[in-house]
Image (cartoon, helix red, strand yellow):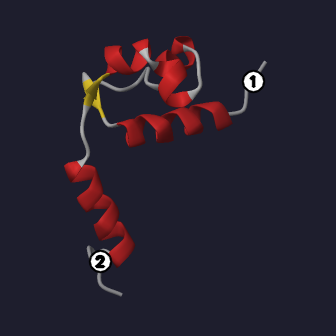
Amino acid sequence: MAVGKKTKSEAKKASQAEHEALFFIADLREHAKELFGIKAEVLDGALFHVKEQQISKTEASQLIQTFLAKEVIN
């Protein structure tokens, strides 16, 4: 199998990501309840490690789902 070749679905996802609108994290935080159904504090936790000032809604949603699926350790 050749290294570096993308499947059609991977290429489509990459293409969509390139053309998707970017939003300031502050704006997403302000509208977190309407956009994602979560409190702004949850968005803060999910995007804590993100260094960019802008992010797509799809990427934010994926990070939120990953954050919410993490196990809490006591």
**Residue 40, x across and y down, in percent:** 51, 13
**Residue 64, x across and y down, in percent:** 53, 32
In this rendering, the answer to whether 46 lies above or below 59 is: above
The answer, for residue 42, to whether it is visible in the render is yes
Can you identify the residue that label 1 sits on?
73
Can you identify the residue that label 2 sits on?
3
In the orientation shown, which residue stands out farthest toward the right? Answer: 74
**Residue 52, x across and y down, in percent:** 25, 26
**Residue 19, x across and y down, in percent:** 20, 50
Q: At 26% from the left edge and 46% from the top edge, which residue is drawn?
A: 20
What amino acid is found at the position of numbered circle 2 in the picture?
Val
The quarter of the picture where residue 39 lies is top right
Instruction: Using the numbered discs, state the Cα–Cα distance from disc 2 to disc 1 in whole angstroms.
Output: 38 Å
Q: Residues within 10 Å of mark 1 (few under 14, many from 20)?
A: few
Q: At 30% from the left edge and 74% from the top edge, which residue is drawn?
A: 6
In the orientation shown, which residue stands out farthest toward the left? Answer: 19
